[in-house]
Image: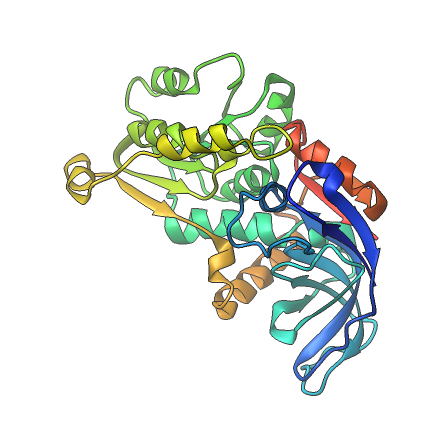
Amino acid sequence: MRAVWITRYGPPEVLEVRESPDPCPREHQVRIRVRAAGLNFAEIMARQGLYPDAPKPPCVVGYEVSGEVDARGAGAGDFQEGDRVVAFTHFGGHADTVVVPQDQVRAIPHMMSFEMAAALPVNYITAQHMIYRIACVRPGESVLVHMAAGGVGTAALQLMRSISGLTIFGTASEAKHDYVRAQGCTHPIDYRHADYFKQVLELTRGRGVDVVLDPLGGRDWKKGYQLLAPGGRLIAFGFANMAKGSQRRVYHVMRQWLSVPRFSPLKLMDDNRSIAGVNMGHLWESKDTLSGQVDELISLYAAGRIEPRIDSTFRFEDAVLSHRRMESRNSMGKILLVP
């Protein structure tokens, strides 16, 4: 088995491809020969030592893979060798061979490539969970999507195209505006050269928005809350502001922690606003929920209603470049690793 290891906390150069014996599936498990694996910002933060859920180095991270079943343990459902599948791995996915419980695996249709399949689980389930289960976005509402050209941002824009009458604001650099418009964004905002807070208020004539999807954290959570109209919902699902550059900076991390706003239930009640948090890694035991959402997403893909956008694909040997690409904030859509 070949895998991309985080050898220690630090810049992308701490990544190293190592070989080890192939794992063997136990009861109710299947082994997958990986054809593509997704890279997420969580793995960047894990490498920098900013993701508390990740295993400590040396370790292999990675939440999602696609490939072919090549071995199965007793009681591993209906999966057979050669079946094309997508799976949740909850770390360990950046390897050419993984073993996972059979209930974390789903068959994929023949029209879906391995690259498309690997780009589906984390981004689209996160977006789907926020939009339909947590924020309960309704027709005619307004939504602010931060990092609109990223993996989750792209998924959110595509999924919300099925909700009529939405006005969607999306923060993205100017070079990405045509892209996010094509995905369904009504008003792209260049956060690098404009104050998105002021622009949203101007465009909404001071009303604000009904929903904010925020993976940034810190002061942006406070701004997002202040942008909410009566009955508005702020959904916090990441803390990207914590990472600056290619490795952890203690002073910057402390400043970000100190900038996290404090909310009181009395204040929420008085303002008629709500705040919710989403961490899909902490829903890992809710397999019925996750598996059901994957089934829905595969059906939406087969119907042509969603299509992951692949930004770039890197070989394991070029994993350093994949991390640099994500840290550059220049990517649009999903970054993949392939063995």
Residue toward you, 118 or 43? 43
Residue that extends furthest to the top in the rendered view of this protein = 193
Image position of 77 (left or right of 97): left
The spot of residue 243 in percent (x, y) is: 55, 33
Residue toward you, 23 or 266? 23
Q: Where is 7 relative to 164, above or below?
A: below
Q: Where is 97 relative to 255, above or below?
A: below
The spot of residue 258 in percent (x, y) is: 36, 32
Q: Where is 109 relative to 312, above or below?
A: below
The spot of residue 76 in percent (x, y) is: 68, 82
Q: What residue do we see at 52% from left, 54% from top?
A: 53
Q: What residue do we see at 79% from left, 48% from top?
A: 16
Q: What residue do we see at 41% from left, 42% from top?
A: 236
Q: Residue 154, located in which quarter of the rendered image?
A: top right
Q: Is residue 311 visible?
A: no
Q: What residue do we see at 53% from left, 47% from top?
A: 51
Residue that extends furthest to the bottom in the rendered view of this protein = 74
Q: Is residue 5 visible?
A: yes
Image position of 226 (left or right of 339): left
Residue toward you, 86 or 318? 318
Image position of 337 (left or right of 263): right
The spot of residue 60 in percent (x, y) is: 69, 56
Q: Quadrant of the N terminus?
A: bottom right
